[in-house]
Amino acid sequence: MHSILIRNNVKILGQGSQVILFAHGFGCAQSSWKYITDAFLADYRVILFDYVGSGQSDRNQYDYHKYSTLEGYACDVIDIIETLGLKDIIFVGHSVSSMIGMIAALQIPKSFKKLIFIGPSPKYLNDRDYIGGFEASDIESIFNQIAEDYVGWTKTISPAVIDKAEKPELSDFLQECFEETEPSIALAFAMATFKADYRDQLKNLEVPSLTLQSSKDIMAPQSAGDYIHQNTRENFLVVMKATGHYPHISEPEETIREIKEFIEDRKVDDRSMDLTLNNSYNF
């Protein structure tokens, strides 16, 4: 037990009995949740962690073969859940962690109560009628930039994905998060992320889920969020006013509100009615 908690730098906070497990996205660490976690501490038991190779995890445990696919990262999630004996958890995953959480939920569904996807994508690469947002040449260019000058790439990408020009300190914060990851590990995580395709797994998910889609996201376009919503049972879709790929950093209040409404089953009746009226939501 102790070794897993150290390996993934697990932190357990909060006062409640309902567990919320926050899983960070590519290039980040648990620190990326700092703008929203305080809002849950009074009523929930909050668990934060770093994937192996990220943040303050034990990088000596990093295995390039294991983490060459998202299943390797899902193993981290399952290890933490089983080590702590968690049941009926709320899983909040940002970006690639949305699909990592889905993989874990498909393996141990009884451990999950609800899943919340923030800026998810089941496949980043465009594929015929499917719009993931990237061509193969785009992804290859990202790999090359990370390999050649990771720090330079983080300086360019951070303001673009935060999309909050009036608050440059937020993109600076994100850049610092990125720079905590060793470039070779960042490249391997990027490859596992951008080469993934989990579209065919969505239909197998039985745990209720929420897709939080930013209204403008260059990493995960609304077409990706729509695809998840249309191909996953019991999935809600909320298109946020927030823009950018990191609404939990750029618009924490809106993000907190939407997460709590889904967790607490508020507005479910309204959303079911919306389905009848305009097909905006479904179960």
Image (spheres, grey):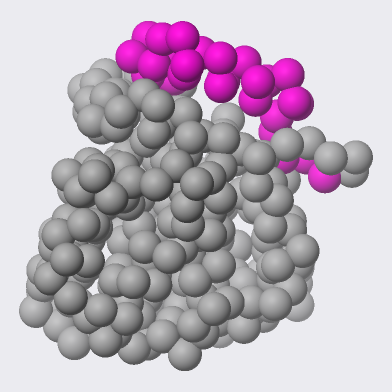
Q: Which residue occupies the foreground of this view, 142 or 281?
A: 142
177 above or below 231? Answer: above
Give the side of residue 22 with respect to residue 211, left or right. Answer: left
Which residue is drawn at the image coordinates 14% and 60% (left, top)? 6
Q: Position of residue 62 (x, y in %)?
A: 33, 46
Residue 208, magenta (yes or no): no
Picture quadrant of residue 255: bottom left
| Residue 225 shows in the view | yes
What is the magenta range?
130-159
Give the side of residue 275 with respect to residue 51, left or right. Answer: right
Judged from this view, the residue extending furthest toward the right is: 128
Q: Position of residue 242 (x, y in %)?
A: 44, 41
Picture quadrant of residue 184: top left
Q: Position of residue 11 (x, y in %)?
A: 14, 63
Q: Which residue occupies the foreground of this view, 97 or 3?
A: 3
Give the side of residue 241 with respect to residue 24, left or right. Answer: right
Give the side of residue 20 with respect to residue 99, left or right. Answer: left
| Residue 267 shows in the view | no
181 above or below 68? Answer: above
94 above or below 210? Answer: above
Q: Which residue occupies the foreground of this view, 127 or 244?
A: 127
Quadrant holding the N terminus: bottom left
Q: Position of residue 198 (x, y in %)?
A: 68, 57
Quadrant holding the C terminus: bottom right
Which residue is drawn at the image coordinates 82% and 44% (left, top)? 130
Q: What is the magenta segment's predominant secondary structure?
A: helix
Which residue is drawn at the image coordinates 28% and 50% (left, top)? 61
Which residue is drawn at the image coordinates 54% and 78% (left, top)? 107
**Total numbered circles:** 0
Residue 158, magenta (yes or no): yes
